[in-house]
Image (cartoon, rainbow, N blue to C red):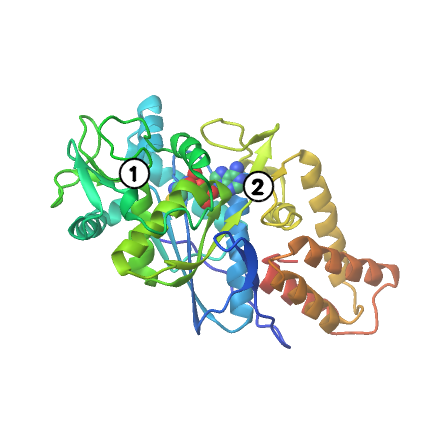
């Protein structure tokens, strides 16, 4: 499906710094070491409601990863899915009386507009699950041929007993796994399952639900295997980063990693499993099912999208944080200060600032540290009505654009 449009990213002078990134599966920060082509898959939206600040926080985090890789000269190959057929989408469509396809299309279009406004660089492939059902079914058949699946009343399950690496992404123990599995779309109590944690690969057609013909019978793919298939087909195994919010650590990325392992024999399926923190409102994780949402499209009616981006940048991507309106006001002030500073005829040394911003971002995307460095530069410039470096304002504009996605 159509992705969204990209802005031109300026080239920066001087030395780039290799990105160090937290890998959930290793439980530590490690240096990412991509080849000439850096490969990243980020889990996309389930399009049954508009983009909220939590989604934006996640896509923003991985946008910074892509920008750091670009700065280091890598060709960034980025793939994202849209879960355009799944239970919550079908439920919302039924409640509102809109066709599920229409609902998905409408919300995906809104999402594209929000991503563009926030200057989040687009994926090279933006893939709706409904576009690749046949291919997902093929991979499920391949898993069955390897003997890691079983059938239950026409549905197909992955047998966790045949997933030797299961648990290595999340590091969670069984009680926690069982709780999260039930909370996040799993069916631990279904009678007939061999293990409560066995996960659904193929759901046979139910009356009134969409279904596709396949060698597995008529039905539709389960959630986890869609991302495994789309990542594998576009990026290949051993890709550099699998990303999403921390609510995807388990079961989604755990199950996906085991599927990838079973299909390719390669471990790890992705070299880094990296997760953004959760954004909350009124003390609870922002979620479409709870309805405590701050929509990006609403914020955009009243605020410069660059100020919204600065709200995201002001938090470390791994932190959980709570949205309060004061954050928007603070970001508006910062944006105005930076814009005044780069309008001056000169400023303090621009290249030193660039080195500092690169150094902060290379350290597991310390965006608050990068903002603090630019704040200090801008404060100094404004206090002195400029500074000795005549090329600094233009360089600061370029670095804010290329590394932080902020147009000044
Ligand atoms: N379609 C699946 C992924 S394959 C899905 O989780 N969709 S979603 O619409 O629920 O979420 C889209 C992305 O936003 C996911 O990466 C999810 O981890 C992230 N996300 C959802 N809620 C929040 C939140 N409150 N804070 C931060 N990130 C969030
Ligand atoms: Zn996913």
Q: Position of residue 347 (x, y in %)?
A: 80, 68
**Residue reaching furthest to the bottom:** 14
Q: Is the residue 373 above or below the residue 206 in the image?
A: below
Q: Residue at x 65, y 56 (%)?
A: 366
Q: Is the residue 172 above or below the residue 184 in the image?
A: below
User: For this view, does 166 lie left or right of residue 318?
Assistant: left
Q: Nearer the viewer, mark 2 or mark 1?
A: 1
User: For this view, does 148 lie left or right of residue 346?
Assistant: left
User: For this view, does 7 lie left or right of residue 142?
Assistant: right
Mark 2 lies on residue: 300
Mark 1 lies on residue: 198
Tag 2: Cα neighbours inside 10 Å, few (<14), some, or many (≥20)?
A: some
How far separated are the C-alphas under marks 2 and 1?
A: 42 Å
Helix, strand or loop at mark 1: loop
User: For this view, does 329 lie left or right of residue 98?
Assistant: right
Q: Position of residue 107 (x, y in %)?
A: 40, 38
Q: Position of residue 9 (x, y in %)?
A: 54, 66
The C terminus: image quadrant: bottom right
Which image quadrant is residue 218 in?
top left
Q: How many marks?
A: 2
Which image quadrant is residue 372 in?
bottom right
Helix, strand or loop at mark 2: helix
| Upstream in sequence: badge 2 or badge 1 | 1
Residue 301 in sight here: yes
Q: Residue at x 83, y 69 (%)?
A: 387
């Amino acid at each position: 499906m159509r992705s969204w449009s990209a802005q031109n990213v300026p080239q920066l002078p001087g030395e780039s710094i290799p990105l160090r990134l937290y890998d959930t599966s290793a439980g530590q920060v490690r240096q990412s070491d991509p080849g000439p082509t850096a490969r990243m898959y980020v889990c996309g939206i389930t399009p049954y409601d508009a983009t909220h600040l939590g989604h934006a926080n996640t896509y923003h985090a991985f946008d910074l990863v892509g920008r750091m890789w670009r700065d280091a000269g890598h060709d960034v190959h980025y793939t994202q899915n849209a879960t355009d057929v799944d239970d919550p989408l079908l439920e919302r469509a039924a409640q509102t009386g809109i066709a599920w396809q229409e609902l998905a299309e409408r919300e995906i279009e809104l999402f594209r507009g929000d991503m563009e406004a926030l200057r989040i660089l687009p994926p090279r492939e933006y893939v709706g699950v409904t576009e690749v059902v046949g291919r997902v079914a093929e991979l499920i058949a391949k898993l069955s041929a390897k003997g890691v699946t079983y059938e239950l009343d026409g549905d197909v399950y992955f047998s966790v007993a045949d997933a030797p690496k299961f648990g290595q992404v999340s590091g969670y123990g069984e009680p926690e796994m069982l709780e999260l599995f039930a909370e996040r779309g799993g069916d631990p109590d279904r009678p007939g399952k061999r293990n409560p944690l066995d996960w659904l690969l193929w759901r046979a057609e139910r009356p009134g639900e969409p279904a596709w013909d396949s060698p597995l019978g008529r039905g539709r793919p389960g959630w986890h295997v869609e991302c495994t298939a789309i990542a594998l087909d576009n990026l290949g195994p051993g890709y550099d980063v699998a990303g999403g919010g921390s609510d995807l650590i388990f079961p989604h990325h755990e199950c996906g990693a085991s599927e990838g392992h079973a299909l390719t024999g390669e471990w790890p399926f992705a070299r880094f499993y990296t997760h953004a923190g959760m954004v909350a409102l009124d003390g609870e994780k922002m979620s479409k099912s709870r309805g405590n949402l701050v929509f990006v499209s609403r914020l955009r009616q009243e605020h410069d999208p660059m100020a919204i981006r600065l709200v995201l940048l002001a938090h470390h991507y791994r932190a959980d944080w709570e949205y309060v309106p004061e954050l928007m006001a603070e970001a508006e002030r910062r944006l105005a200060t930076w814009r005044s500073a780069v309008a001056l005829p000169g400023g303090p040394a621009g290249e030193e600032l660039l080195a500092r911003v690169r150094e902060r971002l290379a350290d597991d995307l310390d965006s608050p540290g990068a903002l603090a460095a630019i704040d200090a530069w801008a404060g100094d410039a404004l206090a002195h009505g400029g500074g000795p470096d005549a090329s600094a304002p233009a360089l600061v504009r370029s670095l804010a654009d290329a590394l932080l996605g902020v147009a000044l």
